[in-house]
Image (cartoon, grey):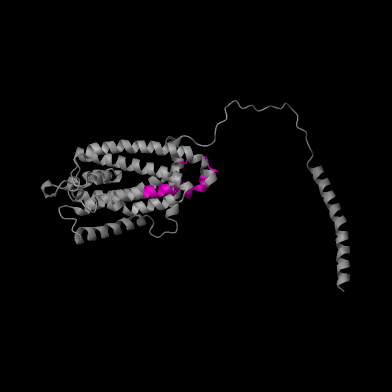
């Protein structure tokens, strides 16, 4: 029975093949009649390119990043959308961690360890340092991960690759700006009276902070493409950064040790983040103190301006070197990603 069915199916298949061939030849003939072939006539022109061949990879560096502001805006918007996707609180998460950290430090350092003694308006003194460290940590940490996190765009699109660390810096500024507004409001309520010296200190502190953070973001973003350990190194360092700047304790405690331990003092003051905190405390915290006699010890280094200007120059040199290093190794990014 099975043999008979198999023989019958073979006969049907044999009859179907000639019919299929006939239908294909008929369809081809109909198409040939419906679409006649027309020969193109006329003179042909040869295309000549007079321009030089240009490398398609970008070489403009940071200057090209700010020339392509529209692309930079799109990258920043994309990063913000990724951060707040499927989030109920959204931007409020940027304040949860600083608020919790402020509460813990204010209670533990201020009242349990009594580090607030001799520091009027200790909350503003502390919150200024938290804002500075938060901005620096988010820029450095986000910039280090920026190239690897956007590897699809790095491999497919022609754009200056420095745009990703710069976008991380702008995202950090977007999260930090409302905190600065809150800090400013508290200072105004406490009787803030600005002077030109305070304004100059604030500008110098911000320039040092932004320049140093961007230099590290460029340098570590390139290194993180080759060795993923660098993002863990950044996280480890940032765990101790709050203790390496005078925010939970006044600068007077650091100054009291400068004669006994001059090397440690100079190493401490070589930290650009510590100098940024000191300069911004000079801008936010110092102008609300009406009676300087309430301060115990020296609250600011005697060579604050000299150290600040030298540190700014050093940070600019570091930014230049980081840009040169980034440009030198970015050609290897696609193959390593």
Q: Nearer the viewer, residue 331 or 123?
A: 331
Question: Residue at coordinates 39% horizontally, 36% vertically from top-left?
Answer: 320
Whether residue 238 is situated above or below residue 219 in the rendered picture = below
Query: The N terminus appears in which quarter of the rendering?
Result: bottom right
Question: Residue at coordinates 42% horizontally, 54% vertically from top-left?
Answer: 83
Q: Which of 332 and 198 is in front in this view?
A: 332
Q: Does the magenta stretch include residue 42?
A: no
Left-right relation of 155 to 231: right
* Image position, residue 129 (x, y; %): 27, 50
* Image position, residue 197 (x, y; %): 20, 38
> Magenta part mainly helix, strand or loop?
helix
Whether residue 281 is situated above or below residue 100 in the rendered picture = above
Query: In the image as oriented, which residue stretches furthest toward the bottom?
Result: 1
Left-right relation of 310 to 325: left
Q: Tell me if residue 159 can be seen.
A: no
* Image position, residue 269 (x, y; %): 26, 44
Question: Residue at coordinates 78% horizontally, 33% vertically from top-left?
Answer: 39
Left-right relation of 152 to 73: right
Q: Does the magenta stretch include residue 148?
A: yes
Q: What stretch is highlighted in magenta?
A: 138-161
Question: Residue at coordinates 87% horizontally, 64% vertically from top-left?
Answer: 10
* Count of marks placed on residues: 0
Q: Tell me if residue 109 can be seen.
A: yes
Left-right relation of 65 to 250: right
* Image position, residue 101 (x, y; %): 29, 57
């Amino acid at each position: 029975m099975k043999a008979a069915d198999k023989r019958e199916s073979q006969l049907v298949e044999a009859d179907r093949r000639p019919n299929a061939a006939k239908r294909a030849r008929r369809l081809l003939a109909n198409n040939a009649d419906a679409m006649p072939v027309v020969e193109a006539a006329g003179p042909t022109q040869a295309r000549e390119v007079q321009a030089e061949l240009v490398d398609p990879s970008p070489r403009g560096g940071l200057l090209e990043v700010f020339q392509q502001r529209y692309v930079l805006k799109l990258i920043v918007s994309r990063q913000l959308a990724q951060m707040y996707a499927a989030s109920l609180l959204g931007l409020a998460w940027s304040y949860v961690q600083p608020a919790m950290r402020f509460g813990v430090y204010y209670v533990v350092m201020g009242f349990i360890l009594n580090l607030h003694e001799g520091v009027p308006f200790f909350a503003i003194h502390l919150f200024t340092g938290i804002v500075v460290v938060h901005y620096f940590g988010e820029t450095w940490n986000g910039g280090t991960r920026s190239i690897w996190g956007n590897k699809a765009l790095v491999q497919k699109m022609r754009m200056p690759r420095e745009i990703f660390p710069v976008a991380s810096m702008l995202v950090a500024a977007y999260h930090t700006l409302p905190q600065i507004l809150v800090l400013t409001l508290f200072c105004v309520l406490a009787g803030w009276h600005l002077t030109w010296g305070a304004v100059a200190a604030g500008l110098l502190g911000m320039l040092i902070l932004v320049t140093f953070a961007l230099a590290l973001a460029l340098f570590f973003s390139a290194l993180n493409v080759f060795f993923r350990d660098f993002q863990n190194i950044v996280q480890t360092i940032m765990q101790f950064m709050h203790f390496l700047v005078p925010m939970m304790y006044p600068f007077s405690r650091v100054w009291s040790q400068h004669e006994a331990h001059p090397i440690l003092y100079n190493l401490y003051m070589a930290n650009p983040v510590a100098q940024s905190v000191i300069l911004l405390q000079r801008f936010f915290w110092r102008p609300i103190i009406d009676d300087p006699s309430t301060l115990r010890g020296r609250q600011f280094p005697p060579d604050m301006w000299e150290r600040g200007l030298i540190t700014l120059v050093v940070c600019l040199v570091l930014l230049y070197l980081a840009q040169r290093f980034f440009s030198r190794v970015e050609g290897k990014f696609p193959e390593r990603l």
